[in-house]
Image: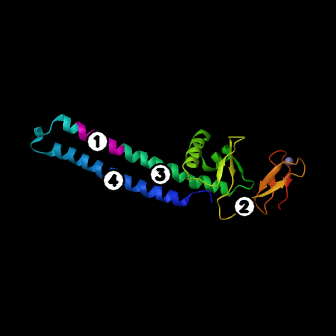
Amino acid sequence: MYVNKKKISVTLGMIKVKIIVWGILGSIFLLSLMGSLLDKNIDKYGAGFRISVIVLAAICALFIVLNVLKRIKIMSAYRISNAFENDSDGIMKISEIANSVHMPVPKLEKYLLWLLNNNYLINCRFDERNQSNIILTDVNSAQTNQFVVMECVSCGARIQARPGQGVKCPSCGTFIAPK
Ligand SMILES: [Zn+2]
């Protein structure tokens, strides 16, 4: 499991509350704008009043949009995690992930950085030696030893694989039989 389900559900709950609060506030501003336009005594409200409520309603709308965008970003952790689950050797190229989640690489890189820094994605990290790779670690997972380390029979490279699954050596391309 590569998503931090607990943290994600807490954050999504908070986002929901924020969207409701900003929605109620924005509606109040819009209603008072309508009220001022429908009032028989229309001159009672100056242009300043209307501009202020429009600005305030726009600010509320902006906060709603920002929260919706944050929600989309967080939900992408599930799609990324699914791509990780299907991986056999514990190393994923970012371009590979981008393909499977249908996201352009620069956007995915930004999302990955944010999701990892904020702990929405767990048990994986950027490869220190090659920033275009993500290493799946599972160190905090209850399911320990999710990967076995093997040595390539032809070039001797150290490779990771899921138990019982064969894998192609990333260095020389030789197929290594499952352990
Ligand atoms: Zn090899």
Which residue corresponds to mark 1?
A: 56
Determine if the C-beta at disc 3 is less than 8 A from ligand 1.
no
Which residue corresponds to mark 2?
A: 146
Between the C-alphas of marks 3 and 4, the distance is: 16 Å
Which class describes the residues within 10 Å of circle 2: few (<14), some (14-19), or many (20+)?
A: some
Determine if the C-beta at disc 4 is less than 8 A from ligand 1.
no
Between the C-alphas of marks 3 and 2, the distance is: 30 Å
Q: Nearer the viewer, mark 2 or mark 1?
A: 2
Tag 2 or tag 4, which sits nearer the N-term? 4
Q: Are marks 2 and 1 in contact (CB under 8 Å)?
A: no
Between the C-alphas of marks 4 and 1, the distance is: 13 Å
Q: Quadrant of the C terminus?
A: bottom right
Q: Is 25 on the left or on the right of 124, as rendered?
A: left
Q: Residue at x 21, y 38 (%)?
A: 50
Between the C-alphas of marks 1 and 3, the distance is: 23 Å
Which residue corresponds to mark 4?
A: 21
Tag 2 or tag 3, which sits nearer the N-term? 3
Which class describes the residues within 10 Å of circle 4: few (<14), some (14-19), or many (20+)?
A: some
As displayed, is residue 2 above or below residue 57? below
* Residue 76 part of the magenta segment: no
Tag 1 or tag 4, which sits nearer the N-term? 4
Look at label 1 and name its amino acid. Answer: Leu
Secondary structure, magenta segment, majority class: helix
As displayed, is residue 156 above or below residue 85? above
Indicate the position of residue 82 as horizontal and vertical percent values.
62, 56
Q: Are marks 3 and 4 in contact (CB under 8 Å)?
A: no
Q: Is 32 on the left or on the right of 112, as rendered?
A: left
The numbered mark at residue 71 is 3
Look at label 2 and name its amino acid. Answer: Gln
Between 89 and 97, the one lying in front of the other is 89
Look at label 4 and name its amino acid. Answer: Val
The magenta stretch is 51-61
